[in-house]
Amino acid sequence: MGKTLNCISPIDGSVYASRETLDLDAARSEVAAVRSAQKAWAARPLQERIDLVMAGVAAIGEMNDEIVPELAHMMGRPVRFGGEFGGFNERASHMAQIAAESLADIEVGEDATFKRYIKRIPHGVVFVVAPWNYPYMTAINTVAPALIAGNTVVLKHATQTLLVGERMAKAFHAAGVPEDVFKNVFLDHDTTSALIAEKAFDFVNFTGSVGGGQAMERAAAGTFTGVGTELGGKDPGYVMEDADVDAAVDTLIDGAMFNSGQCCCGIERIYVHESLYDAFVEKALAVVNGYKLGNPLDAETTIGPMANVRFAQEVRDQIAEAIEQGAVAHIATMDADDGGAYLTPQILTNVTHEMRVMRDESFGPVVGIMKVSSDEEAIKLMNDSDFGLTASIWTKDLERAQAVGDQIETGTVFMNRADYLDPGLCWTGCKNTGRGGGLSVIGYHNLTRPKSYHLKKVTA
């Protein structure tokens, strides 16, 4: 018998959805069916695969009115923000548009004697383990290009967003993607690790915690199964003395607080040039004091509960420890703060890198702001982290931003924007943020393997 997975709603602590996990034998059977379907799927014309995937994407869009409140119940995002379909569709559409070019043979040369080229070959069965914070957008990053490239896909979604994988599978199947080509499964950790260790999959893509990524790599050790990981982050913002301070405040504070701070590339620490520091802090406080914390089903709510009480407790602990060490908290406790999942967003000053709130991933609505006097100081602080996903630089000087960006240990450098995933660029990180890369042409390269052809035409 399998185990029961329960999605606990952060709205009121009730069980919103439950599903039974597959035992190991049943899971093996499901994956075997997906493997059996792969060659026929890969043999279909590329455009046919693209059309079926995009029809599945459109079918998700048709469900959006149901999905938005469902997400509020499962992980607390306010309904006023309308769900994820815009980004979901943007990412899938871009990968569909670049598929033919990205997957085309690489022509090395041909003459009367030889023909040489490199093909992109699908791995086979791709296992996607998706997180709860942006459950549709993070899943589609891999699901769409993996299917388009000719892989079959097994999706395992986070317990906190238990119904997302079911909805995606239902939509794609209704659009004509065969059930054994894209399958949603409910698995516990032990069964997941056992399948990976048995080489059930040809590639594993995991988005989640550092500990989860380590578990995936341990399970795959010695199997030679490729594992791509997007893990923790502690993304910095740096506001230079020539920055547009109003735009910087609006974007960086939104990047820190949107989705209750539960964003992979959310801003978790901000460094401001001393000449703009006071103005930046004053404007940032005005923004956050204007938020309405409350039930995410209420259209007036601008910041909802964190997805789980234990996530909120980690943020509370980091804030309390920082205050004990001398940090100053500026936002008064909001009426809806219940000591549980509903957490007052917080801005801290007088912070240092001795504090966990400036080192450990918070993944919640808190940001520390520090004063700096030079690019050199800011670069040193930005790089003083175990993580490297994105960094946001604010300046009017493009060349300066590029020069500073070259010295930051990160996967993406933003100038005058933050907290955005451009599907034309590789989504990647370094250090404890993980390895590999999604989306863009590089995403296709990671979801396929190269196969070289060295064909000699004559032997005489």
Image (spheres, rainbow, N blue to C red):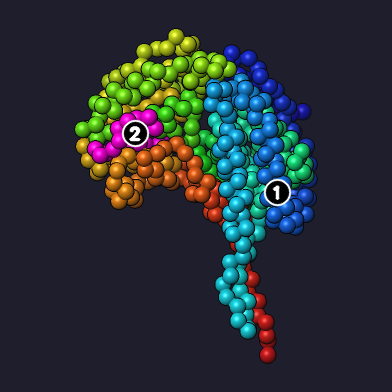
Give left or right: position of 268 versus 136: left
Residue matched to label 2: 248
User: In the displayed structure, would residue 347 be above or below residue 190?
Assistant: above
Quadrant in the picture for residue 58? top right
Instruction: State the SS at label 2.
Output: helix
Instruction: Give the number of the disc on residue 214.
Output: none
* Mark 1 vs mark 2, CA separation in Å: 40 Å
In the image, 282 versus 408, the foreground residue is 282
Q: Measuring 64% from the left and 23% from the top, which residue is drawn there? A: 70
Q: Measuring 24% from the left and 37% from the top, which residue is drawn there? A: 241
Give left or right: position of 169 versus 263: right
Type of amino acid at the residue the image marks with label 1: Asp
Q: Residues within 10 Å of mark 2 (few under 14, many from 20)?
A: many
Q: Position of residue 323 (x, y in %)?
A: 32, 19
User: In the displayed structure, would residue 374 be above or below residue 402?
Assistant: above
Q: Which contiguous range is marked in magenta?
A: 234-252
Residue matched to label 1: 51
Q: Does residue 237 belong to the magenta stretch? A: yes
State whether residue 435 appears in this view.
no
In the image, 158 versus 167, the foreground residue is 167
Quarter of the picture holding the N terminus: top right
Q: Position of residue 90 (x, y in %)?
A: 57, 42
